[in-house]
Image (cartoon, rainbow, N blue to C red):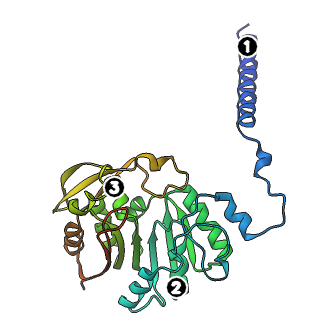
Amino acid sequence: MLQRLAVKLRRIRELLAFKNNRNAQVHVREGHNILDEYVQIAPTDQNALDIFKGEWSSRLPGRWKDLEAGAISLFDDARIVWAAEQLGGFNGQRILELGPLEAGHTYMLESLGAESILAIEANTRAYLKCLVVKEILGLNRSRFVLGDFISFLRQNEAPFDVCLASGVLYHMQNPCELIQLISQTSKKIILWTHYYDQKFIQTKARVAEKFSSHLKKNHNGFEHAVYKYSYGDALNWTGFCGGGVSHSYWMSRDDILACLRFFDFQDLKIGFEDPDHQNGPSFCVIGIRGE
């Protein structure tokens, strides 16, 4: 009797599982027609770019410049050329790139002779865009990996010659920790970032309204302040290229430089200072760790 009952119960569970699975499949089909994902014309580079139509930030370089993507010249960026000049070039260098966005700087690093580039991207759409660019431009010394670079840096033991951290520091929850982790991984740092300066930020209402509070912090003995920045409506854009939380913390210019020195980046060179940048004051810093 009990055996027969067990068999019936098993059959009921199987029927319910089948029904639930069927309902899930129907739900997927109701929300999206998979045939919309097929391309019905001959292969072109533009087809690949159009997977993310309206989401691109960068304009492609050279013979690809007429392809429709974004408008910013990240594939021909004077900051990377300047950094190469300050550091004696990138020939034979193993480079760690944090947040490659759309592989613009990655392309430049390869073009300038880097031996290898490991580029870590946490935004899944940005990661896939990097793979599209890698295929179109034929990058062959760059590897793109998907994940959180803070988690990577906390456990990484492999040394790099240079770390490129462009446009990421001001997206951090703990920007000071990022600088410390880079100092444990690379002898040289290329840092481009926005920073907090109340005098300049108050002149731009659109930027000023995103700041709500500041905190005093101590990270491994380094005393500093951070300023909370909320992304707001920017989170509604599929091309969003900020951090993985609804807010981040900015540091002041003086604290950034002091933090770099605290974690042994003694030889600092500053360029591309722009206190009137539309998204907040910014600058580029090259740092080399002491021996």
Q: Disc 1 designates what residue?
A: 3
Can you identify the residue that label 2 sits on? 115
Residue 142 in the figure: left or right of residue 85:
right
For residue 24, which quarter of the picture? Answer: top right
Q: In screen coordinates, is 172 left or right of 135?
A: left
Q: Earlier in the sequence, mark 2 or mark 1?
A: 1
**Amino acid type, callout 1:** Gln
Is residue 282 positioned above or below 246 on the image?
A: below
Residue 264 is left or right of residue 80, and the answer is left
Residue 207 is labelled as 3
Q: Secondary structure at mark 2?
A: loop
- Taking the spot 69% from the left edge, 61% from the top edge, the residue there is 50
Label 3 amino acid? Answer: Val
CA distance separating discs 2 and 3: 39 Å
Q: Is residue 50 left or right of residue 170?
A: right
User: Image quarter for residue 226?
Assistant: bottom left
